[in-house]
Image: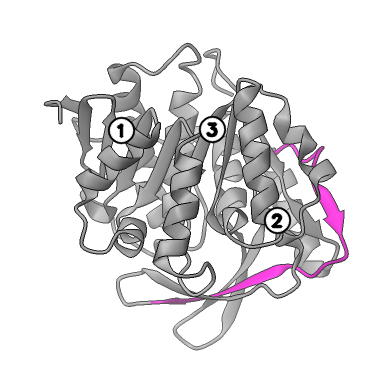
Amino acid sequence: MDSRPGLGVTVLGEAVVDLVQAPDGRFTAHPGGSPLNVAVGLARLGVPAALLARFSTSRFGRQLRTHAEGNGVDLRHAVDTDDPATLAIASLRGDGVAAYDFYVEGTADWQWRDEELSPALTGRGILHTGSLAVFLSPGADRVADALHTARARGALISIDPNIRPGLIGTPAQARARIEHLAALAHLVKASEEDVAWLYPGRPVEDVLRHWRDLGAALAVVTLGADGALALSGTRRFRQPAPAVEVVDTIGAGDAFTAGLLAELSHAADGWTDEDVAAALRYAVEVAAVTCTRAGADPPCREELTGCAGAGGPLPAV
């Protein structure tokens, strides 16, 4: 556990089983889902992390719950349900990048009730959500209402759209929802692929400025092997990533988010330029380690060697 004082993080959203296809055609089940991955990543980095998820009581659901508990994630407010677990079928390209097909009809993750979300509304610490939880009905509208309430009560709100085309409507529909959430978020983090799908043809920096103008205190876009770009107020940050041998990229974006939130959680009184630069350096290192092993398997704090690259604020934009 990091000895520095800081904020706890509550992660709200889905826990999914990733069925990853090996080159021989066989599938291996890995715990996954962006919110679950972020919560596990935070716990491994020594940050108090709670996951507010709906766990199926099926064998897959029990596997997901055991994975979270075994990594030290606080599940006291998680919900058990007889609904089936969500499945994601992942196939890997030659460069290790995964493509997904989802089985979501009637599954546990999207059936939120208002009373199940009340533990997220205390107003303490950081509340992070995103991915399918903020798009799929009937739960998405209730999640949005919960974010409004938590923000009003003093929580720091973090959003990652983690776009899954084919499940969330048209880009225009998804863009409207994300912009509604960005207006109440302190942090918006997305991937370069997310931005390209949401805002076709629009430069990444324009999108960062747009999210800033909507109200986000910090807007971040990951650029794969090229690191990350961020905007905080009038300051621009560019952080290169370390070169690693990639096994696959499953969970790398979630590991980045965990690293980012882990560092920012120690700046409870506001994020300075130095805080943001340090968080970006840490996040790219956490993500890089995750890329060197199969599945969403983020590192523990003890495995990290230090901050990578020489990032920091660049001229105002």
Relative to the observer, which residue lies in front, 90 or 169?
169
Measure how far apart labels 3 and 1 are at the Cα level: 21 Å
Earlier in the chain: of badge 3 and badge 1, it is 3
Instruction: Tell which of 198 and 267 is nearer to you.
Output: 198
Residue 48 image-quadrant placement: top right
Q: Are marks 2 and 1 in contact (CB under 8 Å)?
A: no
Residue ID at (70%, 48%):
142
Dot 2 or dot 1, earlier in sequence = 2
Residue type for callout 3 = Ile
Label 3: which secondary element: strand
Q: Residue at x 54, y 42 (%)?
A: 41
Residue most toward the bottom?
25
**Rendered residue at 31%/48% (across/down):** 222
Give the residue number, with chain letter if any, for mark 1. Answer: 281
Viewer-proximal residue, 300 or 36?
Answer: 36
Write the residue at 26% across / 52% down.
223
Q: Position of residue 167 (x, y in %)?
A: 54, 71
- Where is 140 relative to 257, above or below? below
| One can see residue 98 in this view | yes
Q: Amino acid at mark 2?
A: Gly
Q: Which residue is mark 3?
A: 157
Relative to 207, is 103 above or below? below
Between tags 2 and 1, which lies in front? 2
Give yes or no for contact between labels 3 and 2 (Cβ–Cβ under 8 Å): no
Residue stretch rendered in magenta on the structure: 73-92
Mark 3 or 2, nearer chain start? 2
Q: Which residue is mark 2?
A: 139
Q: Position of residue 100 (x, y in %)?
A: 49, 74
Q: Residues within 10 Å of mark 1 (few under 14, many from 20)?
A: many
Residue 222 counted in the magenta span: no
In this picture, residue 250 sits left or right of residue 211? right
Q: Position of residue 6 (x, y in %)?
A: 55, 17
